[in-house]
Amino acid sequence: MTKIIMNGCSGHMGRVISELVEADENAVIVAGVDLVTPKDATYPVYAAYADVKEEADVLIDFSTPKILTNLLTEAKKRKMPLVLCTTGYTKEQIAEIAEASKEIPIVRSANMSLGVNVLIRLVQEAAKTLAAEGFDIEIVEKHHRLKKDAPSGTALAIADAINEALPKAKEYVFDRSQRSEQRPKDEIGISAVRGGTIVGDHDVIFAGTDEVITISHTAYSKAIFGKGAVVAAKFLAGQKPGMYTMKDVIG
């Protein structure tokens, strides 16, 4: 039984994860952390992680980058493994997380979906063969109208994974409107679509001569991110200090 502390328990994803764990025979949330206590909370909720009295195996964080330093400080004191699902970290904060991973095990991913992380593995394998044969690579991501950042962190993570698989990294191109030239071979085009209530679509297009291969992932609910976070929490409990990714989680 994996004992979990849910940081950000009153937020949308915190509530989603609470429901998922409630139905999971192999996990339990022993405490939550948030400034607001959910009305239907089945576990004690504290205003700060430092106030939590319950023993746990791992902490899942779906909150805000603003509390990162305090969260890492307290986690290191308790030797508490962390699943960091929050996005929007600065380069300095990412470095801070990497430093903390020398003392505690941490999973951090731009996207907690198991499906997206399998897609990343697939596109890496495809890129090794197709890029060498001259296929052009384009990434198209679609999200709801309320999403502020573009391109998505997942699209960038996919592009980074492709470059990791290639002998020579390709340049990212986000806008061709000011260019009047043929498409260079050494680039990855990344396009963003915003509209409606699209949860998240990612298409990776390998366009060659007379043939096109598209590898796609569609999210129909944010619950997929919660499921991935719970799987990551089970994986991380008992691991040695270090920085882990969803690639490690899915094996």
Image (cartoon, rainbow, N blue to C red):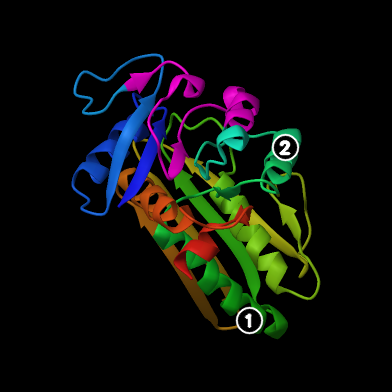
Q: What residue does disc 1 label?
A: 130
Residue 184, image x, y percentages:
78, 66
Residue 94, image x, y percentages:
70, 40
Please identify the quarter of the rendering in which residue 21 is found. Answer: top left
Check disc 1: other Cα within 10 Å, few if <14, some if 14-19, many if 20+. Answer: some
Q: Earlier in the sequence, mark 2 or mark 1?
A: 2
Question: Alpha-carbon distance for marks 2 and 1?
Answer: 37 Å
**Callout 1: helix, strand or loop?**
helix
Residue at the (48%, 62%) spot, across then down: 249
Residue 200 tag number:
none
Residue at the (34%, 30%) spot, across then down: 31
Q: Say left or right for 102 vs 239.
A: right
Asked whether 18 or 206 is in front, the reply is 18
Asked whether 106 or 62 is in front, the reply is 106
**Callout 2: helix, strand or loop?**
helix
Residue 118, image x, y percentages:
46, 67
Asked whether 139 or 1 is in front, the reply is 1
Check disc 2: other Cα within 10 Å, few if <14, some if 14-19, many if 20+. Answer: some
Amino acid carrying label 1: it is Leu
Residue at the (69%, 73%) spot, across then down: 165
Residue at the (34%, 24%) spot, across then down: 10
Residue 67 on the magenta segment: yes
Amino acid carrying label 2: it is Glu
The span picked out in magenta is 45-74
